[in-house]
Amino acid sequence: MRRVSRLISLRMRPRTSEIARASAFSVALILPFILAITGCASMQEEKGPMFVVSEEDRAALVALEESIVPLERVAVPADVSRARKAASSLKARTVLDADFQARLAAWSGRLSLLEAKPIEAERSYREAQAFVPVVGPSAVLGIRLAGDAEKRLAACDALERRFGQLPEALVERGRALLELGRYREAVAAFDTAFPELLPIYRRTWGPERDRAWAARDLADGTVGSMATLAAERVLTWQGALTLARDGTKLIEFATGGKKAVPARQLVKPLLDAGILPVGFTADSLEAPLRREAAAWFLWRLAARRSGDVSSLERYSRYLSVSGDPSPIPDVPVSSLFFDAIMGSVESEFLSLVDGRRFNPEGTVAGAEFFAALRRVEEGTYR
């Protein structure tokens, strides 16, 4: 007060009407921010910004978002600390905009989760809601505070019923569905969300979407090793036999219907039935599954399922009469795998890599092999 008095004494005292105008201006400037802080009902119903946010503040908030999102997949303590400092710096600016403050509070809460401070995260969530009932970052925070995957999915449903689809919430829906083994639904959620969001979301959660895509042919609720194998980029014979054993009924003749039979114990009955290539041993289980061998395995299973043993040499027998060359340049008729490769391509178990070549020595991904197994089992091929 003394300082104010000294400042006033240095100037000519204003007239009463000027004082009134100045007071009214001060109240008009300060009141909206006070109301925002206290979370009044009228502020919560605000649909647009109270004030124009500067480009600098807007860019800083986007930068904060881009720094936090990757940390929510792989948290690096030093980076979390830097993000916290950035959030605190933004908060000190006291930007007079409800939407801005709601988002900032939500990002602060999400940092609190990364810092293992759930009580502070809850507090930030309530603060964000006091500014605006829901924005993308606070929607995600609320979902994550819900608990396990089932509860998070229920929170997504409740949020969508009230506010419609929010891209950020769709990412959380995809993550919850992936965790629950509902892979096709997860892919749909991710693919709907990503085009509406900053590229950092696809870079961060794209691998989760790809995992869901790789496992899309698994039955709903299949989690654990089956889902992991389906997502393998290079499948081993061990993985191939596990997928056939646990994901289909195609080799029940070798397992006796038991799921826990080790892959090594399956080698002899599968060899005896001609399902495994000649020369296969237990040591081969750790080797990558080659495309030509995968074709052999699949084509032989298909012949066994259909009971049409004559199909095993259908193509080479025809070409030996016609004298025509192999229609696949890198698979000669003389190849041990020729019929299996021709049958697998024609039945669409496996495809030509460039429309012409088969690449017999190439490896097979888990998703590709499991999809082929399902086609064999369902009999949906020519």
Image (cartoon, grey):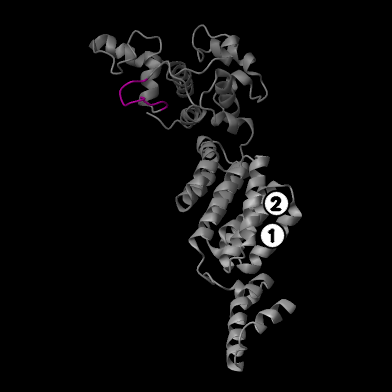
Q: Residue at x 58, y 19 (%)?
A: 238
What residue appears at the point 59 percent right and 10 percent down from the top-left corner?
283
Q: Nearer the viewer, residue 18 or 108?
A: 18
Pick out the residue farthest to the bottom: 16
Residue 70 circle label: none
x, y percent for residue 342: 36, 19
* Residues packed near mark 1 inside 10 Å, few (<14), some (14 to 19) or many (20 plus): many
Of 47 and 156, the residue lying toward us = 47
Tell me, yes or no, whether the highlighted magenta stretch contains residue 125: no
337 above or below 260? above
Q: For residue 303, which quarter of the picture?
A: top left
Q: Which residue does the numbered mark 1 point to in the structure image?
A: 124
- In 3D space, how far apart are the residues under numbered discs 1 and 2 (Cα atoms)? 9 Å
Where in the figure is residue 288, as x and y percent of width and height? 52, 17
Amino acid type, callout 1: Ser
Q: Which residues are magenta?
A: 349-358
The residue sitting at the front extreme is 10
Mark closer to the chain start, 1 or 2: 2
Horizontal side, residue 366 vs residue 118: left or right: left
Residue for badge 2? 112
